[in-house]
Image (cartoon, rainbow, N blue to C red):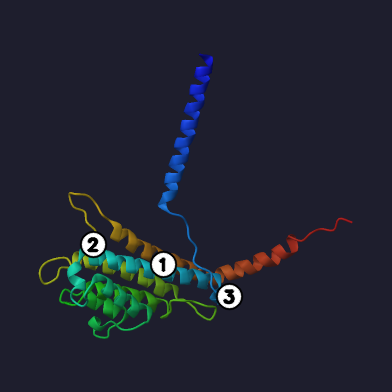
Amino acid sequence: MQRLRCTYAVLCVCAALTGCSAMEAASTRHGEVKGASASSGEMGQSDTNRIATIAMRSNLDSLYLLMEKLYRRNPVEWKKTAASREESIKRVRAAIEQRQSWPGLQGQRDIKALSLALTPEFNGDRVAAFIYASADMIIAAHDGKTEFFLVDGLDAQHLYNAARNIEIAVWLMGSRRNVEGKVLLLSDDMGEAGRNLSFEREFSKIVGRLDLLAAFVTEKYRRAGINYVQNLFGGSLLQFLPVR
């Protein structure tokens, strides 16, 4: 009987440990941190350059994800200019990456393009125009670049302004009405069936990255002076002492 009780206790402990392992394994399925791929160009980048480059890539990827999601909720938009959703996405991405103008925006760029894409009278592919204009505005705030090296500089106020522009654009997209009385683009859904705020979360990521980079850039020169002093004092304080 005593042996049975011991066996039962051991089995319970094993089951508990197995359950904990399963829970731990399940928690890791949410994803893991993945760093950007290394490249030879990093040798010409400072810490600020590298952070700006990674943030830019992440912001563009967020916009491409939002474009796909917006097309799924607004399929009538891609049908205005392309044979398929995939073809339209490919064309918009190419225009952004190659710094080409978007035909439906009448040659406008930056905030002028964003304003045009969000006018009620605009009758082109609004998803393409909105995503292209948002990307072009963000790139313009980074002095027209998507990669940054030692010779490049960033204006913190321009980055801050870009973050506010995204916030304004998202608000206009959901509050303005087109000529038919409907919101310009369907995005987040907060109906009786549930709440889907995935669009808001992705736009918030873009705003957060821009704000953080703006704050980081404002501290760059101050930190350079602090680092110099730290190295100066550290060089004399952190030396090995003679032992004989």
Would you say 156 lies left or right of 167 here?
right
Disc 3 on helix, strand or loop?
helix
- Provide the residue designation for mark 3: 43
- Tell whether label 2 touches label 1 (CB within 8 Å): no
Disc 2 on helix, strand or loop?
loop
Q: Residues within 10 Å of mark 3 (few under 14, many from 20)?
A: few
Task: Determine the image quadrant of residue 67.
Answer: bottom left
Disc 1 on helix, strand or loop?
helix
- Provide the residue designation for mark 2: 187
Image quadrant containing the C terminus: bottom right
- Tell whether label 2 touches label 3 (CB within 8 Å): no
Q: Which badge, 3 or 1, is on the more N-terminal residue?
A: 3
Q: Which badge, 3 or 2, is on the more N-terminal residue?
A: 3
Mark number for residue 160?
Answer: none
Q: Residues within 10 Å of mark 1 (few under 14, many from 20)?
A: some
Name which residue type carries label 3. Met
- Provide the residue designation for mark 1: 58
Name which residue type carries label 1. Ser
